[in-house]
Amino acid sequence: MEFQITVTVNHGNIAFSFTTDTKGSNLESGFKAIKKLVPIANKFVDGAEVRTIPANPVGSLQTNKKARRGKAETSLIIQKVEELLLPDYFSKPKSTGDVRSELHSRTGISFQSRKVSQALGALALRGKLGRTGSKEKQDFRYFNP
């Protein structure tokens, strides 16, 4: 039985994928195609949902703002909170849900609630946000310290 392997390379909110065999016979050409597509893709990614298949079907390009992003998602949330919300948004205590909704309205990205919570906790540990509430009740509120 011959297996196919899907190789996915993430670049920001863009995921590039191509398939190869178990020997990886087209890895080099797949990565070269992705390298050529990155500048083109960056022109399209301005909050738009893009799905492109290049003329040479070595790979495909898609953006998916709801895709799972793991650790990178928490880092992105921290970055967005620092850029967009820290100066004035936290004048009154805000819940994780409040922050998640505000991030969605300002960025158009639907972040996972648990990732927003992780990011806010990290900012509180760094002293950039104050935190009130209890872990048992899971009702933390975040504010400017």
Image (cartoon, helix red, strand yellow):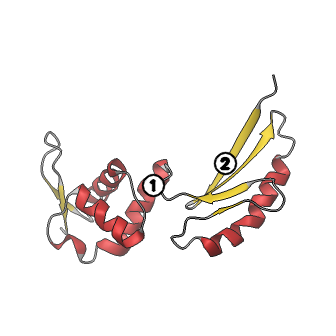
In the image, is 115 to the left or to the right of 130? right
Which residue is label 1 attached to? 73
**For the view shown, which residue lies furthest in the top direction?**
1
Task: Give the percent coordinates (x, y) of residue 31.
Answer: 78, 54
Precedes in sequence: disc 1 or disc 2? 2
- Residue at 80%, 41% in the rendered image: 20
- Could you tell me how far apart the alpha carbons at marks 1 and 2 are, in whole angstroms? 17 Å
Image quadrant in which you'd find residue 6: top right
Relative to 19, is 108 above or below? below
Q: Which of marks 1 and 2 is in front?
A: 2
In the image, is 19 to the left or to the right of 45? right
In the image, is 30 to the left or to the right of 73? right
Mark 1: amino acid:
Glu
- Along the viewing direction, whichever of 111 and 80 lies nearer the viewer: 111
- Residue at 15%, 64% in the rendered image: 93
Mark 2: amino acid:
Thr
Task: Give the percent coordinates (x, y) of residue 109.
Answer: 43, 63
Which residue is label 2 attached to? 8
